[in-house]
Image (cartoon, coloured by chain):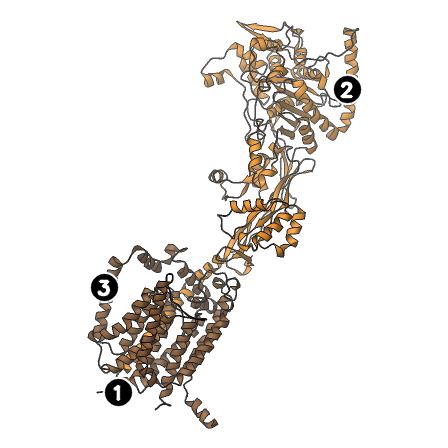
Chain colours: A orange, B brown
Amino acid sequence: MFGEEELVKIHKDRAAILSYIITAAFGLVLSRLWYLQVYKGETLHNYSIQNRLRKEVVWAPRGLINSRDDQLLVDNIPRFDAILTPQFLIDNEETLDKLAKILSTDVTEIKKILKKNSNQARYRPIIVKKNISFGELAQIESQNADLPGISVDTFISREYRDKEIGAHLLGYISEISQIQLPKLRERDKMEYRLGDFIGQFGIEEQLDRYLRGENGHEFVEVDARGRRKRYINTDNLFKGIEDEKPLSGMNVKLTIDRDMQVAAFNALEGKVGGIIAIDIDSGEVLTMVSRPSFDPSQFSRGLTPEYWRSLVGNKEHPLRDRNIQEHFSPGSTFKAITGIAAFEHGEIDENTEVNCGGSFRLGRKVYHCWKKEGHGPTNLVKAIRESCNVFFQKAANRMDIDDISKYAKAFGLGARTGISLPREVNGLIPTKEWKRKRYGQEWQAGETLSCAIGQSYVIASTIQMAVSYAAIANGGKIFRPFVVKDIYDSQGELVKTFTPELLSEITMKNPKTLKFVREGLFQVVNNPKGTAFARRGQGILMAGKTGTSQVKSASADKVYQKCELMDYESRHHALFVGFAPYDNPKIAAAAIVEHGCHGSSAATPVVEAVMTQYMKKYQPEMYLANLEKDKTIKDSWIKSLRAAQPVKPKPAEPAAE
Amino acid sequence: MNQTIIQFLKRYDFSFLGSMAAIFLVGVLNLYSATHAQSHEGLDLLWKSQIGWFLFAVTVAIAISFINPKTFERFAYFGYILTLFLVLLVLLMGKVGMGAQRWLILGPIRMQPSEFMKLGLVLALARYFTKVYPERQLGFKDLIVPGMIMGIPAIMVIVQPDLGTGMLLVFIFSMMIFYKRLKWRTIVTLGVISIVSGVLMYNFGLREYQKKRIHTFIDPYEDAKGSGYNAIQSEIAIGSGRLFGKGFKNSSQASLNYLPENHTDFVFAIFNEEHGFFGSVFLIILYLVFFMRMVWLATSVQRFFDSVLVVGIMSIFFWHAFINMAMVSGLLPIVGIPLPLMSYGGSSMLTFGVGVGMATSVSNSRNFFN
């Protein structure tokens, strides 16, 4: 038997081993700690920072858009949303009652919104009301303590100051959708993210890379549940975790005149159509308006379903631009081109007279002039003035379609003008070759007759017509139309300026061609027998051509049916294309009024309004001088009328073109 | 009279109480630092109740330190039976009530009998080893009765279910039989058996989700947001402390709640984040001093019961400390084992107080009671 002390003694070596085991165990822990804290310390330290930091986008202010006369067209304005974070909501009923009172809505409305969002995380704020007023903002801020969970979110809204005016030109911005994302990334080679705003239409789309700027970011500290704790000063953190200030987008100055835009918009009141006006010596687009229109501001914060429905459900298609994204038969406005082709081709000269008996027969088909009884003996000037179909058809009959097409294309038709705006249409000027390829058929002589008066295959947009008439006015120079004058950075430094681009210059074989075509166009407006005489305006000394574009080809018995008696859908489109002033041309414009019936009554006033605005603003002296010239012209035609019809000195009001 | 008090104080062993106070001081500061920002969870005042528990535990320790260790020996089985009864009570109440139950609620006091079960086990084993062939080296046959003493409460605790504490009982038992001269041959055989049965268990006994738990331990990044989350956040907290730490109250993992349970099981991670590697070296030295002093005490007492008792008490705290540190730093899978004196918790603190009281009593007995 062992004594007690003896017993303790024989266990001593086991105690020693125990002390080694204990030391070794803690040695193991310490070596693990060394591994984590020294070997992997830097990495894990970075993890701990990344853990609690969230990179938040700081949106770059988008560039502003100004008109040529330095009026702000597109602005960024801070707006406020009332938001509610369910997590912090205390005393639901009481708080919601108070909020409803401030926002002057019903509590049930707010509850409905909450219910709709009840499946999302409770820390995520819900927008209760968008765009609250300053009064509401002040009340929410001042009663902050009594409104737990309620706060105000600030955001920058894209504001289009003239709302619907020129919306198609300016375009809009909206969030990149899930569907768009991959396509846009591919197209622009940009790392877009869902929720980024991007120009989706018009200038906003075309100049997006200038206007957009570069988003910055900042880091905020978030807890494990993603709640934002505070802003972090990232100066002392490691590389890669640095705030970056956003880079403001560039400001843009357009060639567009705001006052002319307003005039154009008002002139199109109640109509469906568009007008475009360009400077004939540079191609600067001065006006571009399409109606019906939309309010682009609505797109920047997500469209309300009601507004979207009102746009999509509208039969007049407010989202469609009538100037560059639509084309149509130019109708009689094309006769100026046919006239030039015939003159240049030597088929006619200023003295050539053709007898218009009201119709022209080719083979078994009869081509009617709009004037049933015919125009009688007609020369080029008269044919343009009174829009005689038979004259141009007889002239065309002696030519080939390719001869006409050659001139039409030279004058800028049948191909995109190259304006720097998205989705411009081509229009179409047919040739024999084209028809063969397109339909596998030979060209018919009768088709030439239809094309000669701007029907059949011939289609063009208002911008193309404006370019071609500008070339008639300026002696054959085709400029690429453009809408952006200058681009400035946010400091106001000029970054890029756009100069006129002369695409081609047509040399006329016969120097008299343009002279007599212009004379004809002048008489359209300024001669009592001219088709647009009734809408000639004052002080602009306009020259131009009316036209109708048949929506449905009329059967023989309906050729002379009054347009106004037809169904709205079947009525002709009304056109007017012109330039001014006649003796010193500065501006060319083209307008279309869908289902407007008569170029003179529907489309001419639109052009006249824009040109009058232009003359008053940019050529005030010429405007005054033109008023005098108007009087002289008036005297001269009164005199000539008296000589011809001494009994009734009344100007004849033309029925149509 | 004064003379006697001075004499008494000179002979009283303050080393265990001193160690306890030193570790507690570090612990309560760390607890305050880890929880100060968590007012919304109502945790920011925990450090105050922790101080309360400490004062209570110290009082208990001092009171026990005046008891003659012979009394412990006399009441050893009684203590074991009592704690076993409490554990059983909890088990039955848990069955009656809903789901898992580890707490016994006596009026305002909630206690965790499985904590005290460890002490009961240590007492019973010390008593048994002292009485039955104390000089003999242990073989397989000699393990049958001690195995049952340990096995009954261990199974009851595991059924609660509290696998961590159950395993702890096994580890404490192992350390004590090792001290009681378990034959090397038996140790090797037991080692082989446990490895083989472990492999067999893994291949045939474990369900898929249990296997998955082992996988997440081996590579927590496999399920970083789910079952691996705590392990990863804990490693991040420790590693981000680097050599010198982020400083007092500067733990972002705790204040932003990335690391859950940062006042209980993961206090060591927060301590590492704030005080770095050198801080941990300091803390581990405090623990080591405590354990080594106990091992030394075990070899310097006159009675064998005292020796085995002290080794048992030491092993309770050693396993707690080691398992907690190892699991927090990713050496072991995450099981809910608190770090003595650092983690928040009254029962654990009280166990520690009782243990320190017994050790002090044993130490003092060399001078006083003979």
* Distance (Cα) linking label 2 and label 1: 138 Å
The numbered disc on residue B196 is 3
Look at label 2 and name its amino acid.
Asp
Instruction: Look at mark 1 in the image and give the residue it sits on.
Output: A6
Look at label 3 and name its amino acid.
Val
The answer to whether marks 2 and 1 sit on the same chain is: yes
> Which secondary structure, mark 1?
helix
Query: In the orientation shown, which residue stands out farthest toward the front?
Result: B96
Instruction: Pick whichever of labels 2 and 1 is earlier in the sequence.
Output: 1
Look at label 1 and name its amino acid.
Glu
* B56 relative to B216, above or below: below
Closer to us: A655 or A615? A655
Q: Chain of mark 3?
A: B
The answer to whether marks 2 and 3 sit on the same chain is: no
Instruction: Look at mark 2 in the image and give the residue it sits on.
Output: A630
- Asked if the residue at tag 1 contacts the one at tag 3, i.e. Cβ–Cβ closer than 8 Å, the answer is no
Closer to us: B323 or A544? B323
Q: Nearer the viewer, mark 2 or mark 3?
A: 3
Q: Residue A59 at x, y = what percent?
A: 57, 47
Q: Residue at x 56, y 55 (%)?
A: A90
How busy is the neighbourhood of tag 3: few (under 14 within 10 Å), some, or many (20 plus)?
Answer: few
* A74 relative to A602, above or below: below
Could you tell me which quadrant the C terminus of chain A lies in? Answer: top right
Q: How many marks?
A: 3
